[in-house]
Amino acid sequence: MRHLSKTTAGAAALALLLTACGADDFGGGDDTATGDDTTTGDTTTDDGTDADADAAADAVEPGSESLDGATITVGSKDFDEQLILGEISKLLLEDAGATVVDEIDLGSTFAAREALTGGQIDHYWEYTGTAWIEFYGETEPIADREEQYEAVRELEVGEGLYWLEPSPFNNTYGIAMSREAHDELGVDTLTELGELIESDPDAATLCVESEFEARSDGLPGMEAHYGYEFDPNNVSVLDTGVIYGATADRDPCNFGEIFTTDGRIATLDLVVLEDDQSFFPLYNVSPVFVEDVYEQYGQTLSDLYAPVTAALDDETMAELNARVSSENERPLDVAQDWLTENDFIG
């Protein structure tokens, strides 16, 4: 029996809700498909673009009004990187004259998405791979960063959501192990992990968070893509922040799910296995805004966020994450220091 954290039951219930309601509740649809004749709704043009999305894009011109007098509700997911990004938004918008309602730390991906589509928040940061696979049900990620962003952006315009330019950093999923476990077991790739499952299943112990255990771009998809399956008794579901230490200590697992820009990878000297069959999608992150806010302030927001987002490369994001996860600094303090040091806020 898998070891379950207290969040697992909620995730399972949400999964059942998604199954019952369909992906449309989160902006996707069963009729979405990849290929040259891409459909994103009932109407498809010959060149593979969505006529409804194009019409929506034409209907909404990004506003260029000052943020003075604006009220914008900012949300985020519940892990360190998202908390930092949420605080970056809050400080950046306040510095530009907006009043910010703080809804940072909403919970899982689907909690944040529901808050955005349900009108509880106006903005949070989302990852291209997450939208492509989880919200729209696509099974084949796009290898080019800009093309993946453009594909997601066009789909989201049709839902009244507007994605600003994405960050350079790619916070994709990965599987890691301690240096000691690596030296002992000799596993370097996800393919070799499957060989270990066959030859020594008791050594193939894995720690994951509840969301990764259920997502199609997480454990189920990885197992299907690589053609193996962990013994359910060897999979422990833990809170995200606990996994890194558990993996480093090899208690209760030799392998752990990680985010590739997490600062604890270097701090704990974890070895990230090579995704040698290229399963995990690109996860560049973008500021996402609802239509009402974008329509009035879009140009100002684009200008405001562009230099900030461009500065968030892999190394920078990992360093910011490490200050929270390894050095126990507050996300607000980390965000404020970085924005001030780079002259993004006064």
Image (cartoon, rainbow, N blue to C red):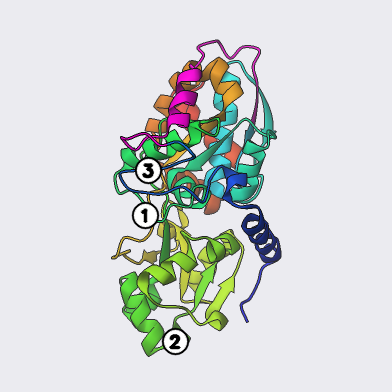
Label 1 – label 2 distance at C-alpha? 30 Å
Q: Which residues are magenta?
A: 44-73
Instruction: Tell me the element at label 2.
Output: helix
CA–CA distance in space, label 3 to label 2: 42 Å
Q: Nearer the viewer, mark 3 or mark 1?
A: 3
Amino acid type at circle 3 is: Thr
Please identify, in this view, whether the residue under mark 1 or under mark 2 is nearer the observer: 1
Instruction: Where is residue 90? Give x, y as percent.
Output: 60, 29
* Residue under label 1: 140
Number of the label disc, if any, that sits on residue 201: 2
Amino acid type assigned to the residue bearing label 2 in the image: Pro
Instruction: Give the residue drawn at x 41%, y 49%.
Output: 33
- Pointer 3 residue: 38
Determine which of the numbered discs, if any, sits on residue 301 in the image: none
Q: Dividing the picture into quarters, in which one does residue 252 lie?
A: bottom right
Residue 256 seen in the figure: yes
Residue at 45% in and 63% down: 268
Residue 87 appears left or right of 184: right
